[in-house]
Image: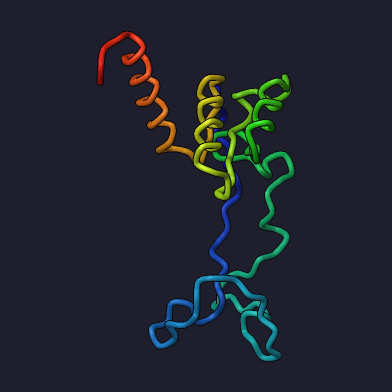
């Protein structure tokens, strides 16, 4: 059973002049304003919000996804096997994430292990579908029917 977590919302923190047609080079990002007469630095309301400590979520909610689970990063297959042995890490508390730099074969093996143990790997969606298709092909080929 998953619990929906509602975190505090905050406005977008952009640098001044973002979105003005004349200034297309201004990207959507945050940089602290340091000019002596800068209106955003002196917190004029018309310039938009600035990040402050008040926008921080409570410690109990920090690091939790919207579905109520935390992310656990898996760097290799051995680490995945060790995590599956650990009784403290259960599928109703954690979702896994795999780094982009991991090889396709390792990602595939991690996805198989996760599917077998009812864990969800967040950033492997297409490969999970391939696993299901591959398993179906293996079953058919084992039964003696050619594909």
Horizontally, is 72 left or right of 130 in the view? right
- Out of 65 and 13, give the one closest to the viewer: 65
Q: Judge whether 102 appears above or below 54 on screen.
A: above
Residue that protrudes farthest toward the bottom in the picture: 37
- Could you tell me which quadrant the N terminus lies in? top right
- Could you tell me which quadrant the C terminus lies in? top left
Please give the name of the residue rendered at 64% of the width and 87% of the height, measured from the top-left corner.
38
How many numbered dots are placed on residues in this image?
0
Please give the name of the residue rendered at 57% of the width and 45% of the height, measured from the top-left corner.
102
Horizontally, is 38 left or right of 139 in the view? right
Q: Residue 97: image x %, image y %?
A: 58, 40
Q: Residue 74: image x %, image y %?
A: 64, 38
Q: Residue 93: image x %, image y %?
A: 64, 28
- Out of 8 and 91, give the one closest to the viewer: 91
Q: Residue 115: image x %, image y %?
A: 50, 24
Q: Quadrant of residue 137?
A: top left
Q: Judge whether 40 appears above or below 98 on screen.
A: below
Q: Judge whether 99 appears above or below 50 on screen.
A: above
The type of colouring in the image is rainbow
- Out of 19 and 75, give the one closest to the viewer: 75
Q: Judge whether 35 appears above or below 66 on screen.
A: below
């Amino acid at each position: 059973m998953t619990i929906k977590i509602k975190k505090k919302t905050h406005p977008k923190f952009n640098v001044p002049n973002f979105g003005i047609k004349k200034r297309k080079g201004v990207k959507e990002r945050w940089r602290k304003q340091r000019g002596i007469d800068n209106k955003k630095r002196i917190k004029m309301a018309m310039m938009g919000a600035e990040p402050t400590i008040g926008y921080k979520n409570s410690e109990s909610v920090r690091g939790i996804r919207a579905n109520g689970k935390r992310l656990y990063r898996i760097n290799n297959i051995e680490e995945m096997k060790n995590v599956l042995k650990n009784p403290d890490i259960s599928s109703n508390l954690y979702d896994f994430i795999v780094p982009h730099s991991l090889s396709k074969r390792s990602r595939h093996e991690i996805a198989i292990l996760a599917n077998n143990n009812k864990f969800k790997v967040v950033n492997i969606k297409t490969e999970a579908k391939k696993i299901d298709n591959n398993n179906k092909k293996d079953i058919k080929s084992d039964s003696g029917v050619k594909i």
